[in-house]
Image (spheres, rainbow, N blue to C red):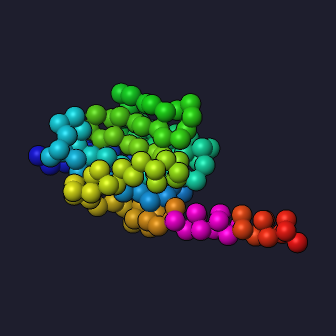
């Protein structure tokens, strides 16, 4: 099997929407050979719950407005730590950065082909790591200030 044109269209629109809302580490996998229930997974993350919700809302709005697609299922909304949007053809996972590291979905799908994404989405790679280093430096500076 292979990813359909419709799935590519959905993935690219969702990836661009996520990038526009400053999601980190956007990546998509063709899972059509290993799963019969969907063609592709899109993974994205954000450093806080509010941003996770914002990314999810933007993806949902853009897919609906631009492609007439509505999710058949939306899970994880209340906590906004890991929100799943199921569009049948594709499944979107937007995770809090901590969940992204802990669950490491990339490890599960590493044998699946990665899908080409818009440039804005590709530019988000490594952002979570940069953000984590920045936060650690800020926390260290705060602690150092407390010791003085």
* Majority secondary structure in the magenta region: helix
Q: Give the image location of residue 130, x and y in percent.
A: 55, 68
- Asked if residue 65 shows in the view, the reply is no
Residue name at image x 49 percent, y 58 percent:
24
Residue name at image x 27 percent, y 46 percent:
40
Residue name at image x 32 percent, y 55 percent:
107
Q: Depth check: 71 or 75 in front? A: 75
Q: Quadrant of residue 122?
A: bottom left
- Asked if residue 77 shows in the view, the reply is yes
18 in relation to 118, above or below: above
Magenta part of the protein: which range?
Answer: 129-138
In the drawing, does residue 142 fall left or right of residue 26?
right
Which residue is at the far left? 1
Q: Depth check: 51 or 47 in front? A: 47
The total number of labels drawn is 0
Which residue is at the far top? 72
Q: Depth check: 73 or 58 in front? A: 73
Q: Quadrant of residue 79?
A: top right
Q: Quadrant of residue 34?
A: top left
Q: Give the image location of residue 145, x and y in percent.
A: 84, 69
Q: Give the image location of residue 1, x and y in percent.
A: 11, 46
In the drawing, does residue 90 fall left or right of residue 85?
left
Residue name at image x 27 percent, y 57 percent:
110
Which residue is at the far front? 147
Query: Residue 31 colored magenta?
Result: no
In the drawing, does residue 134 fall left or right of residue 85?
right
In the drawing, does residue 136 fall left or right of residue 35?
right
138 in relation to 86, above or below: below
Q: Quadrant of the C terminus?
A: bottom right
């Amino acid at each position: 099997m292979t990813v359909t044109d419709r799935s590519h269209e959905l993935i690219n629109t969702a990836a661009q929407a996520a990038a526009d809302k400053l999601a980190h580490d956007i990546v998509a996998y063709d899972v059509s050979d290993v799963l019969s229930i969907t063609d592709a997974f899109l993974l994205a993350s954000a450093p806080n719950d509010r941003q996770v919700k914002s990314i999810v809302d933007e993806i949902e709005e853009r897919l609906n407005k631009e492609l007439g697609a509505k999710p058949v299922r939306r899970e994880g909304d209340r906590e906004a730590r890991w929100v799943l949007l199921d569009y049948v053809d594709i499944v979107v996972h937007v995770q809090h950065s901590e969940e992204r590291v802990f669950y490491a979905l990339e490890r599960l799908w590493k044998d699946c082909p990665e899908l080409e994404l818009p440039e804005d989405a590709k530019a988000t790679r490594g952002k979570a790591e940069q953000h984590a280093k920045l936060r650690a430096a800020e926390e260290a500076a705060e602690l150092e200030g407390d010791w003085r």
